[in-house]
Image (cartoon, rainbow, N blue to C red):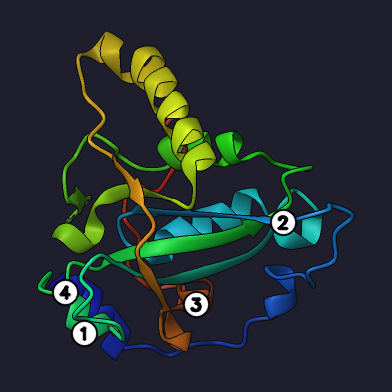
């Protein structure tokens, strides 16, 4: 956490062309969908998601926001500082708007499992606390069933043979709040920003 905070205080962001990582929300799909999940520091989770699904390459992801997903109704407008101690029970999370005609919800959930350590409770790499929990926040019963199905598949195929257990929480979506602007595309703007070593392709 100390390293995480120091990185923010020492920000010297270079110029970043946002067009590389964003696109206008034009799509031939009849409807777009949203997936929300958390897997440790949202800087690295957004970075690896954009690298593998760059919106400008028409791979299905149209927009990604980092923010705070909360389950405590007493804290409706959190900021980075207020959630860092864990008292608000908010989680650093990603909200992804996607075209299900190009990439499915299940594919994105399997990607989520692939790019972090889903067997460590409330921690990723050197970051510890409930704000770094591994979680899938479902918007409806269809998403919950899909998330449970992918989880069972990944557990059986990837972790059971190694006698390890997925600890990811699957729960209903709570209150969402966008993170401050300097957190959006943070690692693209700050090449020296700390990256969680678990945010990589694990298979």
Q: Which residue ends up furthest to the top in the rendered image?
A: 161
**How far apart are the alpha carbons under marks 3 and 2?**
21 Å
Q: Is residue 4 left or right of residue 182?
A: left
Of residues 136 and 195, which is closer to you in this image?
A: 136
Is the residue 142 above or below the residue 188 in the image?
Answer: above
- Which of the marked residues, 1 or 3, is nearer the chain's N terminus? 1
Residue 88 badge: 4
Badge 3 element: loop
Residue 184 badge: 3
**How far apart are the alpha carbons under marks 2 and 4?**
31 Å
Residue 32 badge: 2
**How far apart are the alpha carbons under marks 1 and 3?**
16 Å
**How far apart are the alpha carbons under marks 2 and 1?**
32 Å
Q: How many marks?
A: 4
Q: Which residue ends up furthest to the right in the rendered image?
A: 28
Q: Which residue is found at the position 72% from the left and 45% from the top?
A: 100
Q: Mark 4 or 3, which is nearer the eye?
A: 4
Q: Residues within 10 Å of mark 3 (few under 14, many from 20)?
A: some
Q: Position of residue 112 (x, y in %)?
A: 46, 42
Q: Which residue is label 1 attached to? A: 81
Q: Position of residue 165 (x, y in %)?
A: 22, 24
Q: Position of residue 47 (x, y in %)?
A: 51, 61
Q: Are marks 1 and 3 in contact (CB under 8 Å)?
A: no
Of residues 126 and 78, which is closer to you in this image?
A: 78
């Amino acid at each position: 956490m100390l390293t995480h905070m120091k990185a923010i205080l020492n920000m010297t962001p270079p110029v970043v062309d946002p067009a590389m990582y964003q696109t206008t929300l034009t799509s031939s799909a009849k409807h777009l969908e949203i997936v929300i999940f958390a897997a440790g520091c949202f800087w690295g989770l957004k970075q690896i998601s954009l690298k593998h699904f760059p919106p400008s390459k028409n791979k299905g992801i149209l927009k990604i926001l980092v923010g705070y997903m909360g389950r405590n109704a007493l804290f409706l407008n959190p900021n980075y500082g207020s959630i860092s101690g864990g008292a608000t029970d908010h989680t650093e999370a990603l909200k992804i708007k996607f075209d299900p005609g190009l990439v499915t919800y299940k594919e994105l959930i399997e990607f989520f499992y692939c790019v972090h350590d889903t067997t460590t409770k409330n921690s990723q790499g050197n970051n510890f606390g409930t704000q770094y929990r591994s979680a899938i926040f479902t918007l409806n019963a269809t998403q919950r069933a899909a998330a449970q199905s992918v989880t069972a598949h990944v557990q059986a195929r990837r972790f059971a043979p190694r006698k390890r257990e997925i600890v990811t929480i699957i729960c209903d979506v709570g209150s969402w709040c966008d993170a401050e602007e300097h957190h959006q595309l943070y690692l693209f703007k700050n090449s020296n920003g700390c990256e969680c070593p678990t945010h990589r392709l694990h298979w």
